[in-house]
Amino acid sequence: MTDFGYTLSRSSTVNLDEADRSLWLRLEKLEPDLRLCMACGSCSASCTAAELGGMSLRKVILDLDRGRDPAPIVSACMLCGKCSMVCPRGINTRHLILSLCRIYEKK
Amino acid sequence: MNDRIASGFAPFVIPFVVGMVFVLGYCFYALVKILLQLPREDRVRFLRSLVTPRCIWKNVRDIFCDCLLHVKLWRRNPLLGYMHSSIAFGWFMLIVLGHVEVMLFVPHRIHFLYYPIFFNYFVAETSETIQGAALFFLMDFFLLIVLSGIALAMIKRVRSRWFGLRRTTRPSLLDRVGLYSLWSIFPLRLLAEGFTAHISGGSFLIVPLNWLFRQFLGNDMNMLPTWWAYSAALCVFMCVLPFTRYMHIPAEMLLIPMRNAGLTIRHPRRGLARVEVFSCPGCGVCIDACPMTVKKANTRDATVYLNRQIRRGNERRIEEISDKCLLCGKCTAVCQVGVEGPMLRVAQRATRHYGLEPDFSGLDTAPVQNNMERFEGAPEGERVAYFAGCMTQLTPGISRSVESVLKKAGVDYRFIDRDGGICCGRPMLTAGRFHQAWQLIRKNSELIRSSGCNVLLLSCPICYKVFREHYRLEGIRVVHHSDYFHELMEQGRLRVEKGDLTYVFHDPCELGRGSGIYEQPRRVLGCAGYLTEAEKNRRESICCGGSLGSLTLGFSQREDITKAALRNLTEGGPDVVVTACPLCRSTFRRYADRPVWDLAEALDKQST
């Protein structure tokens, strides 16, 4: 194959019929605020741990919704609470993260 | 003074002896259990403190002042102080003087547990009585003191506001049994001694009472029943004591030496935590003090209810109360016993099991390291590293002002987290995730050491508290900017002109109650303008409501708390609300009707 210096990015299609959204559904029961998120990304923009461990709450919530494993991202969170200060929807982000850590089960 | 009853026994003493043996047995059992619950090193430390002369003296003094005289309560409200100390100290003196009487007049009866309590029943007045006149006088005097305290206690049930209490707890059923039996003990004693005074003798209180009774009662038929009633009331009180709030009486006597030995809460239910929970007298001062209880919300989440739920073992409520608290520490500041509500809650949070345990031990700090400003070599003198911390990153106005002030004062500084850094670890600690917090603390310590500084300047009290208490940074002085700027002014390195603005200073929880810094920011503001004081300030300052301590309080639930704190600050009509915490500043700014500045910003505007 000819090397053009770039490649096609992997398809990020999400097949919701196959995705395992059980974690999202369980978290949603504990944290109804989850549905308030409009993925604006203020949390990720202000995040202390973003640069250090790739934390992004926006990504975590999107990943959960799409049935992907949020563990690698969410375990970078340092709980500093800046996201809860900037969230325009007033989501209690720290408690959301703690609840997620609580109900998470290793696959 | 002679023995009136040859055997030295009357059946009515049985209830008292039963109660006494039960309560002493229970307290001994509880003491042994708690000592066994303490971690080994704590137990050794505690027992060693009990034989250290300086500690013994401190323990005796504290127990005398706090448990008997209730000195702290006097300061809070004299009427409340008098009520408590009259009952506690008066009762104590009645017991002590009772023993003195037995030792003086019937020394062969001293090993009878009940003799000092029912002394007047067992003795008959003789010509020697005159020697005891002073003792009789004191006995009557202290009985009168106790009775006055009981009368005040009855008034307090209906007019608690006279005693400075707005909201108090609702006593449980057993608490009521204990309360009414305690109230009845002393009037019954008065009656019993009154009916007996013509035989046993007495002083200004019971002798006239006896004379009065004898005017219309022709015989001594009332004597025994009242002694029985007195004994029964004592029995009821002592038998319910371990299951009521009156357990605080023996528990506090254990708490004081434990605290003086320097023990800390390690487990939410065992050891010291248990002693603290049982030391809570359930007075409810913490309900009014708690910033969450504004507009009658969250009243049931005050520390007094946490203690009650822990005693009842209501796990669901314990979890709920533990997670909601802002950890502002005001309940501890106003508590007469000093129950550390926030520590109990953090210990509870630490017991939680998480399916996902982050690990920061392998955290790559290169992104921070590469961008960090640092001291090359080790120049002589002060090398100040300014660590803004997460919250100051959100309020760049503060870090700009800090830098500006430092430049004006000619301080050689490096802004070590200009491009971001690691969280200090305190939010992790307060969430009860100690393991992760320590990993962050270790990583951050490495970073700070690598900056080559010898002074670590912080503009966030949340960081300041954890740096002071948990970091091991040998050779580096940790200082909050309010303290440091005050020093710069004192040394004449920073010139400040007095402006015409009026400021009110809000004491951030972690700076005031948390670290004991109250004066420095006020002196700085006093030089920069005119300072007014809020009604509730210093140790009793009201949390801004933004605290990271609370895990479950949502954005909207915090609004009332913030507004109440602002009302307290702005009542005196200041032009500007000044605080020394980026989190307080952000929180207040949402609802404030006037400017809210950080201390650095206020100082920057007035300094040259």
Image (cartoon, rainbow, N blue to C red):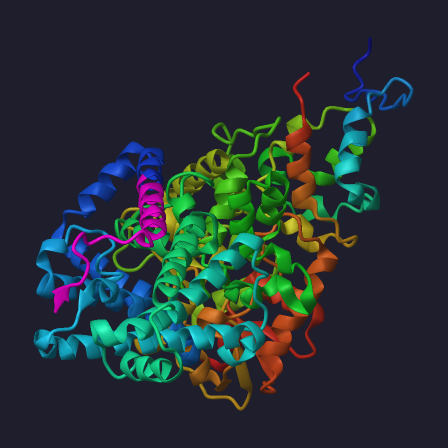
Which residues, given as a range, are shown in magenta? B1-28
Using the rendered image of the protein, determine whether residue B512 is visible from the camera's viewpoint.
no
Q: Residue at x 80, y 47 (%)?
A: A40
Q: Residue at x 42, y 73 (%)?
A: B150
Confirm whether the magenta stretch covers residue B129.
Answer: no
Seen from this angle, which residue lies furthest bottom?
B500
Q: Is residue B429 above or below residue B534?
A: above
Q: Residue at x 19, y 47 (%)?
A: B50
Q: Is residue B152 above or below residue B549?
A: below
Seen from this angle, which residue lies furthest top?
A1
Q: Nearer the viewer, residue B173 or B292?
A: B173
Quadrant (top left, top right, bottom left, bottom right) of the C terminus of chain B: bottom left
Q: Nearer the viewer, residue B78 or B2?
A: B2
Residue B561: give x, y in percent of width and height: 65, 66
Q: How many marks?
A: 0
Confirm whether the magenta stretch covers residue B6.
Answer: yes
Residue B454: give x, y in percent of width and height: 31, 53
**Snapshot quadrant of residue B148:** bottom left
Quadrant (top left, top right, bottom left, bottom right) of the N terminus of chain B: bottom left
Using the rendered image of the protein, determine whether residue B174 is visible from the camera's viewpoint.
yes
Residue B277: give x, y in percent of width and height: 45, 49
Q: Nearer the viewer, residue B27 or B538?
A: B27
Q: Is residue B128 left or right of residue B209?
A: left
Residue B338: give x, y in percent of width and height: 40, 59
